[in-house]
Amino acid sequence: MKKTRGFTLVELAISLAIIGLLLGMLVVPLNAQVDQQRTSDTQKHLQVIHDAVLGFAVANGRLPCPAIATTPNTTAGAGTESRNTGVVPAVCTNTEGVVPWTTLGIAETDAWGRRFTYRITPEFANDPVGGLQATFTLTDNGSITITNGTINIATNVVAAVVSHGKNGVGGYQMTGTQIAGAAGDELVNANADNTFVSKTPDPAFDDLLTWISPNVLKSRMIAGNRLP
């Protein structure tokens, strides 16, 4: 009778190496699919934010104020507008923070678990006064500019919203801590000024943006009888 021959150590090692290589080839496409799904989910949520901000404006005659970015979500009042209601008209305490998710009734973070940076033109977020239906008029324009890093894509923008993408640099976590390391165009989106960059993602830039055009806002306000 012939003796049963098993695998040698060398053969086992080669087999394991081949299996590891095949698994590695599967993991890379799987990771790419996960990243693609998270990007898609975040883009959908940016649209939800865009619509929620416009809906809030029609209902209240103004844009929502940003929430304080550094407040942990375990703290009372996290995600609500940061406003000074002790003056007339009430005004925003900050022109930039994060999307006030509690006020708007939407999710706090993007698909990577970071909050959305949110900047406004303050004149569009003050309370209406003197019986006016809106805090701004048809001739008012915003102060925010959107570029692709070289040329302007949109000017006179009234509000901008940023997801800081997969790497998250410049964005705020649910603990209220900002992720350090923003550089280049990603730093432009995290330095709290009126200029933002929106372009095709690349290895050095994975931010995703949406913004509120003054013309879109005004048309919604007219349709809602907030502007003449």
Image (cartoon, grey):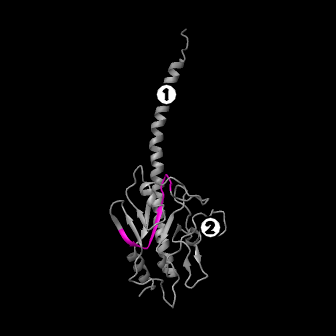
Q: Position of residue 92 (x, y in %)?
A: 54, 76
Closer to viewer: mark 2 or mark 1: 2
- The reply to whether the C-beta atoms of the residues labelled 2 and 1 are less than 8 Å apart is no
Give the quarter of the figure containing the C terminus.
bottom left
Q: Distance between the residues labelled 2 and 1?
A: 51 Å
Q: Residue at x 59, y 68 (%)?
A: 79
Give the quarter of the figure containing the N terminus.
top right
What range is drawn magenta here? 154-169
Inspect the image, locate mark 2, and give the three-letter code of the amino acid beneath it.
Answer: Ala
Inspect the image, locate mark 1, and give the three-letter code of the amino acid beneath it.
Answer: Ala
User: Image check: 149 left or right of 21?
Assistant: left
Q: Where is residue 179 in the image (x, y as percent from the top left)?
A: 54, 55
The front one of 173 and 38 is 173
Residue 114 in which image quadrant:
bottom right
Does residue 96 lie above or below 16 as drawn? below
Label number found at residue 78: 2
Any magenta on residue 40?
A: no
Any magenta on residue 162?
A: yes
Q: Position of residue 18 (x, y in %)?
A: 47, 28
Residue that carries the numbered disc 1 in the rendered image: 17
Q: Residue at x 43, y 62 (%)?
A: 209
The secondary element bearing badge 1 is classed as helix
